[in-house]
């Protein structure tokens, strides 16, 4: 059997179970080195280009700081300030940037844009969030679960809220890849994309991935509860309608009673307290959201080390 070499990270499906395990073990080790002041300059002289078409706090800062800690450099590129924003093609932009930088991270709208970048680029492309996927966030989520629970195998992760967004899709691919079971609860019309759901069920079996209209059913016996904003970037005009529709899917003290006593709560942030999650839960003893945010740094450093040559 030949092992596929990891070239780009566009979705969690680009990773094998071995890649995932290797990345998280490396991330745990680099976290330990960084906390103990042990230098780990694996990317000296290397540059990461970071193209942003949407806002960001965590992704931008964690990639930039990560490259600095690895001895390299990161370049923030707002697409509006680039010729890309004036209509230069994705293919030409990818080819030109490939002549300067050693890797490119992109945060954009349609997932097809990162696929086009990857097709045109001769350096690794990292998806820093598209409308459909957010794989680098899910690497941090899986690292946080691994740190707290010591394993993934056999755990149940429940997601309640907008099933048709980037976080849900990457969690479906990542949670199942890691060995966890997953359940999703979303209102009608906001179910996960059929292609992603079907692919996961075909690969891992129906017993590993379950859908419920009722969030209490989805959360029953869960080890990890995850939610995300009800209105993702790009959906702002639907905010009022979403506030109404998603209300029954809020993670609150009543809902979490259905989970295991030692459940963990995760949210990629930014969060809206009293919308998708109550303050009692996100600021309570089961919440690991700030470890999760910190782990973006460590997990991405492991990813950068693996991808950039
Ligand atoms: N979780 C996440 O991607 O955060 P930012 O939008 O701040 O990068
Ligand atoms: N689903 C959210 C994630 C933000 C990090 C969004 O796309 O806005």
Image (spheres, grey):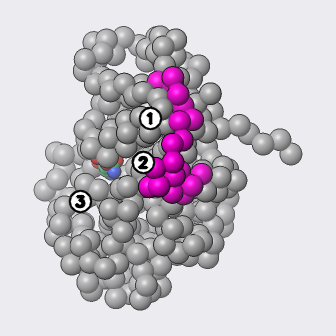
Q: Are marks 2 and 3 in contact (CB under 8 Å)?
A: no
Q: What residue sits 26% from the left and 83% below the top?
A: 253
Q: Which mark is residue 35?
A: none
* Secondary structure of residue under mark 3: loop
Say which residue label 2 marks: 297
Q: Position of residue 304 (x, y in %)?
A: 53, 37
Q: Is residue 255 left or right of residue 117?
A: left
The stretch in magenta equals 26-48
- For the residues marked 1 and 2, what is the alpha-carbon distance in whole angstroms? 9 Å
Q: Which mark is residue 67?
A: 1
* Discs 1, 2 touching: Cβ within 8 Å: no
Does residue 120 appear left or right of residue 16 in this picture? left
Who's the residue at 27% across and 44% down the image? 57
* Cα separation between marks 3 and 1: 26 Å
Please state which of residues 80 and 198 is positioned toward the viewer in this rendering.
80
Q: Residue furthest left?
A: 240
Report which quarter residue 122 is drawn in. Answer: top right
Nearer to me, 158 or 261: 261
Judge whether residue 201 can be spotted in this image. Answer: no
Q: Quick one: label 2, few (<14), some, or many (20+) residues within 10 Å?
A: many
For residue 32: magenta? yes
Q: Name the quarter where the N terminus is drawn.
A: top right
User: Dot 1: within a 10 Å radius of its alpha carbon, few (fewer than 14), some, or many (20 or more) residues?
Assistant: many
Which element is circle 1 on? helix
In the rendered image, the residue lying farthest to the front is: 37
Element carrying mark 2: helix
Mark 3 = which residue?
271
């Amino acid at each position: 059997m030949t092992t596929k070499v990891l070239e780009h990270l566009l979705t969690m499906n680009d990773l094998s179970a071995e890649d995932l395990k290797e990345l998280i073990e490396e991330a745990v080790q680099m976290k330990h080195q960084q906390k103990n002041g042990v230098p780990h300059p694996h990317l000296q002289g290397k540059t990461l280009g970071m193209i942003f078409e949407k806002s960001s706090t965590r992704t931008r800062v964690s990639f930039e700081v990560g490259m600095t800690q690895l001895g390299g450099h990161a370049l923030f590129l707002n697409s509006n300030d680039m010729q890309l924003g004036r209509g230069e093609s994705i293919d030409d932009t990818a080819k030109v940037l490939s002549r300067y930088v050693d890797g490119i991270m992109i945060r954009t709208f349609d997932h097809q844009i990162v696929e086009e970048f990857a097709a045109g680029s001769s350096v690794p492309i990292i998806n820093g969030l598209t409308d459909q996927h957010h794989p680098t966030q899910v690497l941090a989520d899986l690292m946080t679960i691994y740190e707290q629970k010591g394993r993934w195998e056999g755990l149940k992760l429940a997601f309640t809220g907008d099933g048709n967004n980037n976080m849900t899709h990457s969690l479906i691919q990542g949670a199942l890849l890691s060995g966890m079971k997953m359940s999703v609860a979303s209102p009608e019309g906001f179910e996960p994309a059929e292609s992603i759901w079907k692919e996961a069920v075909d690969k891992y079996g129906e017993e590993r991935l379950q859908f419920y209209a009722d969030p209490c059913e989805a959360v029953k016996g869960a080890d990890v509860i995850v939610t995300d904003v009800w209105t993702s970037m790009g959906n702002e005009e639907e905010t009022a309608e979403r506030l109404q529709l998603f209300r029954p899917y809020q993670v609150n003290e009543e809902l979490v009673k259905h989970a295991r006593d030692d459940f963990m709560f995760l949210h990629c942030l930014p969060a809206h307290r009293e919308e998708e999650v109550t303050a009692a839960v996100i600021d309570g003893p089961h919440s690991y959201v700030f470890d999760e945010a910190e782990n973006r740094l460590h997990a991405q450093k492991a990813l950068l080390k693996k991808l950039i040559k």
